Image: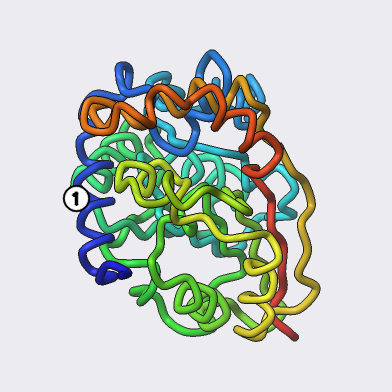
Amino acid sequence: MSRPAEEIRNEVSRDYAKRIAAPAGCGCGCGSLSPQGPLATLAGYSATELSSVPAEMTTSSFACGNPLAYAGVREGDVVLDLGSGAGLDLLLAAQKVGPTGRVMGVDMTDAMIAKANENIRAAKVTNVEVRKGIIEALPVESGSVDWVISNCVINLSPEKQKVFREIFRVLKPGGTMLVSDIVAKDLPSELLAIPTLYSSCISGAISEEAYLEGLREAGMVEVKVLDRLVYDAGQIAGFAETALGEAFDRTPQISKRIGSYAKELAGKIWSAKVYGKKPA
């Protein structure tokens, strides 16, 4: 039986509030599929980009990609970040849009919003704001943004079609979305039943085909995947040991099978950069 959407959202919010409280020791989150080193670097951010933001943001980012890497964001644009977290992508977008542009973030977790506002103040930028809300019902005016970005967040939504419709709603005609997210296929039901894996961006992930079709159903056009990072068995095994944590104590049969699961899951979980446009 599927769990209520609000129950899942509350669980995810609690989990990420704990993670942001101790980012250096967390080792978890969507970015934990990266093998070693700062998550933000491995997710595709350049050294130049990371040197332009507060240093601790490289350890408090739960990234699975850099949604701005292929984005043609220009000065004067309005950018919206879904699930903006500690604000890494907000600050990078602020540099691209310049003083005549505007950047908004939406997050549902108070601790994340507080951390983002702290980082915004530290960076001394004035064209960024963070709003509290859920990505299934964005507190943003219809047809008001040029770009929607997101970094490993939509997979956490229990109501993804609502998110896709909201993306379409808030974009201006001709506006663009470019998100980095985790997608997956053919995952064992035994693993999907472990609640810990939802907040770790696994059991809530849908297939790439379903993702693209959901965007098309919402009205988006030119929908496609621009880039993929497919995780290998070693990355998945390391991730599973970290993400499951205390669940190992309660489910020892799964702990013993991590190696075989990792081999089975290799090539079935990946980070994708998903692009789409709202018709002009």
Whether residue 81 is visible: no
Considering only vertical position in the picture, is 148 above or below 11? below
Q: Nearer the viewer, residue 100 or 158?
A: 158
Quadrant in which the C terminus appears: bottom right
Return the residue found at the far top.
37
The residue depicted at 45 percent of the width and 59 percent of the height is 82
The residue wearing badge 1 is 110
Q: Amino acid at mark 1?
A: Asp
The residue depicted at 33 percent of the width and 45 percent of the height is 194
* x, y percent for residue 195: 30, 48
Residue 54: which quarter of the image?
top left
The residue depicted at 38 percent of the width and 31 percent of the height is 254
Quadrant in which the N terminus appears: bottom left
Q: Nearer the viewer, residue 18 or 98?
A: 18
* x, y percent for residue 167: 53, 74
Whether residue 134 is visible: yes
Residue 5: which quarter of the image?
bottom left
Considering only vertical position in the picture, is 190 above or below 221? above
Q: In the structure shown, which secondary structural element does the residue marked by tag 1 occupy?
A: helix
